[in-house]
Image (cartoon, rainbow, N blue to C red):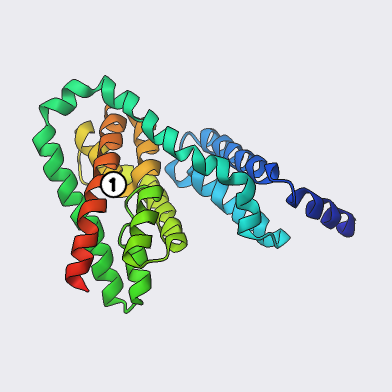
Amino acid sequence: MGEGFTQIWVYLSTTPLLGLTLTLVAYQAGMWIYTRANLNPLLNPVLIAVLLLVGLLMLTGTQYSTYFDGAQFVHFMLGPATVALAVPLYQQFKKVRGSFVTILVAILTGSLTAALSAIGVAWAMGVSRETLLSLAPKSVTAPIAMGISEATGGVPSLTAVLVILTGITGAVLGTWTLNALRITDWRARGLAMGTASHGIGTARALQVNEVAGAFASLAMGLNGLATAVLLPLILRLIF
């Protein structure tokens, strides 16, 4: 029985569509658990999907490159999905325009804090320079973060993992943290989620409140731009 399953898996693993199918099934399983748990942030669907896929790849001994041959379509859709976040932003444009200066100051402060705190903690722990450079853009959406990492001497693949972990952490703990700090303004909550935990945090903000989601999408985009411009300059000064 086990040998038969192995043969079937070897055959299927050569099919590019397998990676895409597994990704969609894993995410749907995560969403099913998430909705049954009344949207408990601890059961974030992205986290569940990642755990299911990693477990399956390890169990079957499948190389990540083989899996990605099929799953890269999902990676491609990150771009259109990010652009689609402009829709809730447009719907809340009057509120955004009325607080634009405050928003810029908040995002610049958050961008610098996210990068410098990561660099400081990593340096204090004695990590290698390559790992430190990979960690610095962790709070930016994956395509931008990987580009920054590659340009500054980091490891893009490691950066991608750190970006995902940062986003999941923000989505899981962000709402509780903001509640504990008694931050009730949905604009401020959205800016915090989008700046600290990019797309995954923005998705969580959209689930909680439409205004928060709009400001989170704005923060994610502007934080990506600010980090892409400022972080290489900061790293050059430090190193």
| Viewer-side residue, 190 vs 153 | 153
- Residue 114 figure quarter: bottom left
Q: Which residue is mark 1?
A: 224
Question: Identity of the amino acid at label 1?
Answer: Gly
For residue 72, which quarter of the picture? Answer: top right
Residue at (37%, 64%) from the top-left corner? 134
Q: Can residue 147 be seen from the camera position used here?
A: yes
Q: Residue furthest front?
A: 151
Q: Position of residue 129 (x, y in %)?
A: 33, 75
Residue at coordinates 38% horizontally, 45% vertically from top-left? 171
Label 1: element kind: helix
Given residues 66 and 121, the one toward you in this image is: 66
Residue 218 at what x, y percent from top left?
26, 35
Specify few, some or many for label 1: CA neighbours under 10 Å numbering under 14, 14-19, or 20 or more.
many
Q: Is residue 193 left or right of residue 234?
A: right
Q: Is residue 52 above or below residue 20?
A: below
Q: Relative to 102, say whether 98 is above or below.
A: above
- Horizontal side of 224 relative to 19 (left or right) equals left
